[in-house]
Amino acid sequence: AKPLLQRALQTLPMGDLRLQAGRLYARCLQRAKQFDEALDVWSSLVEDNPTQEQVYEGLAKLLEHRQKDYPAALETTVRAQAIPGISKFRQKCWKKRADRLQRKCQT
């Protein structure tokens, strides 16, 4: 599945299908413990889809839990909070993540 998803990510035009292929590919890489490669995919998905909350979440989780890069995870979280039109509930979720990351950055 990984080669097929990688090819889809490289060849599909921008849009929902490419976004879904990219998310699946990043998750496959993470399951295979290829965290640096997954980081590259999540980062490119964020750049290509700046209003899609799910890609920020995938990137923030990877940065926090696998890379232990708390400042970068916090930056990603802050960027996600600035997405126009996200619900108040999701704003609270992002705020909670940002608060936790802020504490981790201070230790």
Image (tube, rainbow, N blue to C red):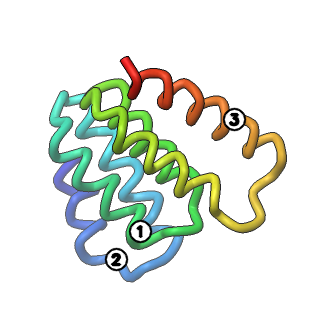
Say which element carries label 2. Answer: loop
Name which of mark 1 and mark 3 comes first in the sequence: 1
At x 36% / y 57%, what residue is drawn?
A: 22
At x 20% / y 36%, what residue is drawn?
A: 35
Q: Pick whichever, 107 or 47, lies toward us.
A: 107
Q: Would residue 39 be found to the left or right of residue 93 on screen?
A: left
Which residue extends farthest top? Answer: 107
Given the image, on which type of amino acid does mark 3 rest? Cys
Given the image, on which type of amino acid does mark 2 rest? Leu
User: Is residue 27 visible to us here?
Assistant: yes
Say which element carries label 3. Answer: helix
Say which element carries label 1. Answer: helix
Q: Pick whichever, 105 or 45, lies toward us.
A: 105
* Pointer 1 with pointer 3, Cβ within 8 A: no
At x 41% / y 51%, what residue is drawn?
A: 23
* Pointer 1 with pointer 2, Cβ within 8 A: yes
Quadrant containing the C terminus in the rendered view:
top left
Mark 2 Cα within 10 Å, few/some/many (few <14, many 20+)? few
* Pointer 2 with pointer 3, Cβ within 8 A: no
Q: Position of residue 13 (x, y in %)?
A: 38, 82
Q: Which residue is tagged 3?
A: 93
Which residue extends farthest front? Answer: 106
Q: Position of residue 33 (x, y in %)?
A: 18, 28
Name which of mark 1 and mark 2 comes first in the sequence: 2
Name which of mark 2 and mark 3 comes first in the sequence: 2
Given the image, on which type of amino acid does mark 1 rest? Arg
Q: Which residue is tagged 2?
A: 12
Q: Which residue is tagged 1?
A: 18
Q: Position of residue 93 (x, y in %)?
A: 69, 35
